[in-house]
Amino acid sequence: MVRLAALLALALTTPALAEDAAHRADRLTTQSLNRRAAAAIARRDRDVGPSQAGYRSARARYEREMAEWRARVAACNAGDWSACR
């Protein structure tokens, strides 16, 4: 009876150990994929940085020009005919 209990206990723990090994392998694979993805994102950000700076500069210039144009339109609509060009 003791042998049967020992065999039963062994049989029940073996799949759990195999499952734990598979889970560990999945976890390690996921960590590796995450590290590679983080490195790819860092490379992308490093390579895109200069063009993003150019975009921000152009966007700021556009926003300034639009604010000036809106101010001229508002002045023109308010009766300042010199602003209507």
Image (spheres, helix red, strand yellow):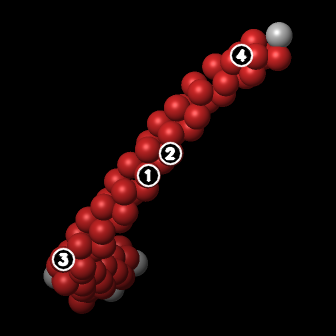
Q: Are there few (<14), some (14-19), or many (20+) residues within 10 Å of tag 3?
A: few
Q: Nearer the viewer, residue 29 or 73?
A: 29
Q: Nearer the viewer, residue 21 or 37?
A: 21
Q: Disc 4 designates what residue?
A: 8
Q: Earlier in the sequence, mark 3 or mark 4?
A: 4
Q: Nearer the viewer, mark 3 or mark 2?
A: 2
**Is the C-beta separation of discs 3 and 2 under 8 Å?**
no
Q: Amino acid under label 1?
A: Leu
Q: Disc 2 designates what residue?
A: 24
Residue at the spot x=83%, y=10% of the render? 1
Q: Earlier in the sequence, mark 1 or mark 3?
A: 1
Q: Disc 3 designates what residue?
A: 47
Q: Amino acid under label 2?
A: Arg
User: Residue farthest to the bottom?
Assistant: 82
Q: Are there few (<14), some (14-19), or many (20+) residues within 10 Å of tag 1?
A: few
**Is the C-beta separation of discs 1 and 2 under 8 Å?**
yes
Q: Earlier in the sequence, mark 3 or mark 2?
A: 2
Tell me where residue 23 appears, x and y as whole percent: 51, 39
Q: Nearer the viewer, mark 1 or mark 3?
A: 1
Tell me where residue 79 appears, x and y as whole percent: 35, 80
Position of residue 26 relative to residue 8, above or below, is below
Q: CA distance from mark 4 to mark 2?
A: 25 Å
Residue at the spot x=50%, y=45% of the render? 24
Task: Count all numbered tags in the image, as a single digit.
Answer: 4
Q: Are there few (<14), some (14-19), or many (20+) residues within 10 Å of tag 4?
A: few
> Is 80 left or right of 52, judged from the image as shown?
right
**Is the C-beta separation of discs 3 and 4 under 8 Å?**
no
Q: CA distance from mark 1 to mark 4?
A: 31 Å
- Mark 2 lies on a secondary structure that is helix
Q: Disc 1 designates what residue?
A: 28
